Structures are given as structure tokens and as C-alpha cells.
Amino acid sequence: MNGVDLSVLYRGPLESCNYACAYCPFAKKKDSRADLARDRAALERFVAWVGARTNDRVSVLFTPWGEGLVRSWYRDALVALTQMPHVDKAAIQTNLSARLDFARDGVASKLGIWATFHPDWTTRDRFVAQVARLVDLGARVSCGVVAMRENVREIELLREALPRAVYLWVNAAKSEARRSQDVYYTPELVARLSAVDPLFEVNAADHPSAGASCRAGASVVSVDGDGDVRRCHFVREVIGNLYDGSFDAALRERPCPNATCGCHIGYVHLDRLELRATFEGGVLERIPAGWPAAPRAVASRSATRRALPIARVAGQSSRPDVR
Ligand code: SF4
Ligand code: SF4
């Protein structure tokens, strides 16, 4: 099949990170030289695959378990992908600690940076300076932070320090909320966090998804270092492979088999939530359309507010949304 409009979330074998956030379920491993060589080879193979899909429109988001941008091969991949005429976007989730000179070498307007601020590992000033560098170069940048209760004032100060044109998303600390013996986010905290990110309550929910229609598996897929394709990072079933010829036939709509979907990179594709319209043009790098104007989903927020498990959460758990 050719001529598809496809978004690919790529996660290779890389597992190491130069930070060690306490809330991180990833990056607890030190990659050996052999591990890194394997990650590099897998990434280069993937970029070559994208390069050959010239009849498609392709967008890519790197969602490594560890930190990719500190590795030269991720920077090279972003440069190469943004230079491909059939690639609309090449984005990466990053802690933004790396040198950013590479952004000059690619097509900056097609470069998406999903930058997460980790206040235990960097300073607000340094993070904001890194963001400013990317904005100056013309990259599309969203910033974000995990809303640990003790960091709420820091999150507000980060919002004040960033240019208004840069969206700052706030992820609910769902694992902490589940462990907490009391209400983790009081109404006052919800109001403060929603003032920073009008879509905070959307992230704070675990969205019921069993049997629901979702574009994951049809127009957006998850790919690992071996080229195995899954519909998303949260459904383990392999539906095809990039390199054995089974990929194109695997692309089709399927109902979601999971009870809930709780991470932005998943639920943004859930048709019922209509978030693709909210994030039109910025789905992968997580920038709402028209930002800093109020995102479209906010208008209907009051209708869903009562259903959002933003206090003490019980029941089905999604993986922590730490970036
Ligand atoms: S949350 Fe991100 S920056 Fe922090 S340790 Fe995990 S991968 Fe590294
Ligand atoms: S709703 Fe979430 S878990 Fe279900 S298929 Fe879509 S992205 Fe995957």
C-alpha cells in the first residue's frame, strides 16, 4: 500500500538516561557500548525505511525509554528526517539537556521538541534558555512537567518564565495520586494547575477506552528497534513488521482492547475525545492548535469534570505519564 498519511512513534532499545528522576519507570539501566551500537543501528535502519516511503506523508515521534537527544544518532536522525520532502514532522521527547546546535542543520520548522522539565536535575533558568534557543531557530517546542504536589509553585514559576507562545503541558502524577492516602490534588491545586495548562484535567483522567475506536493501528503506530509494529505503546500485540513486508496490510481500524488510556501519546488518538482537532498541526509535539488561544477541548471540560479521577485514584492503572 502506498500513499498513506502515517505517524510513527519509534522506541528503540535505548534505556539509559543522564538524569535519574525518582518518578521515572524508564531509564534505570546503564547501556553498554554494545547496547548503544545496537540502538544506533536500529535507528539508522528505521530512518532508512522512512526515507524509502516517498509516496507517503510521514511524521515521526521518538519516544525513547531513556534520553535520546544526548546521543548523536538521534540528533542525526532528526536532521535527516526533517530534510526529507515527504516527512512532515520529526519530533522527540527529551529532557533538553543536550547541545542543540544540530537544530541548525535540519529544517527547523519540521522539528518538534517535546521538552520535559525535571526540577531535581536542572534549573529553571537553564531549561528556559534551552527552549529559547530552539524557538529562535524556528523549532516547534512544547514544554511540560509532572505535577508532583511539592513542585506546583515551581511549575507556576516556569509558566511565568517561558514565553506565552510556548505551551506548557502539565501531566498528573497518577502513580503518586494512587499511592496517596489523602486527596492528592485538592480543588485548589487543580485550579492552579489548570491555570498553567487548560488541558490538565484531560491528562488527569484515565479515559475509558475498551472497544472504543482509536486511530492507533490505522494512521498512527508504534515501532520498536526490530521493526515490530504495535498499534500503540500500550497494547503489546504485534500487528506487523516494517522490514518483512507485513506492515502495510496491518494498517486498519481496530477497537481498543484496554480498559483505559491514560497517556497523551495514546488518548490523543481516541476518536471520542476529539483531541486531534484540539492539537491539529501539533499532535506529535503536543502543541494545541492556535496556542496561546484557549484549546478547544476546554469548552466541554465541565461536562466531563465529575468523571475525572484527579483525587485519590483506584482501579485500572495506566503506566505513569512522566513526560
Ligand atoms: S523521566 Fe525522562 S529525564 Fe527523568 S530519568 Fe526518566 S527518561 Fe530520564
Ligand atoms: S485508546 Fe490508547 S490504549 Fe487503546 S488503542 Fe488507542 S492509544 Fe492504544
Image (cartoon, rainbow, N blue to C red):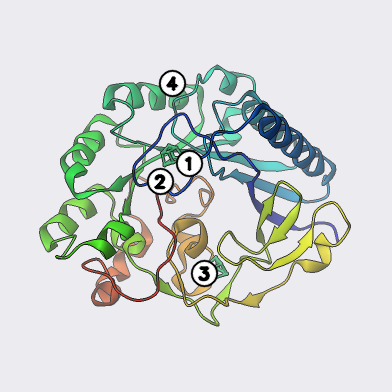
Of helix, strand and loop, which one carries label 2? loop
The dot on residue 148 is none
Q: Is residue 301 above or below residue 224?
A: below
Mark 3 vs 2, N-terminal side: 2
Estimate the spatial distance between the alpha carbons at disc 2 and disc 1, rounded to whole Å.
Answer: 8 Å
Residue tagged 2? 24
Residue tagged 1? 28
Mark 4 vs 3, N-terminal side: 4
Contact? badges 2 and 1 (CB < 8 Å): yes
Q: Is residue 284 above or below residue 300?
A: above
**Left or right: 244 as drawn, with respect to 34:** right
Label 3, residues with CA under 10 Å away: few <14, some 14-19, many ≥20: many
Estimate the spatial distance between the alpha carbons at disc 4 and disc 3, rounded to whole Å.
Answer: 33 Å
Question: Which residue in the rendered view is the most extreme toward the right?
Answer: 245
Estimate the spatial distance between the alpha carbons at disc 1 and disc 4, rounded to whole Å.
Answer: 29 Å
Of helix, strand and loop, which one carries label 3? loop
Residue tagged 3? 270
Q: Amino acid at mark 2?
A: Cys
Q: Amino acid at mark 1?
A: Lys
**Left or right: 150 as drawn, with respect to 50:** left
Q: How many marks?
A: 4
The dot on residue 133 is 4
- Residue 246, x across and y down, in percent: 85, 62
Please state the quadrant of the image where ligand 1 appears: top left
Mark 1 vs 4, N-terminal side: 1
The quadrant in which residue 133 appears is top left
Q: Is residue 85 above or below residue 321?
A: above
Residue drawn at the location 76% of the way across and 34% of the way down: 41
Circle nearer the viewer, 2 or 1: 1
Disc 3 CB within 8 Å of nearest ligand 2 atom: yes
- Residue 215, x across and y down, in percent: 61, 67
Question: Which residue in the rendered view is the most extreme toward the left?
Answer: 188
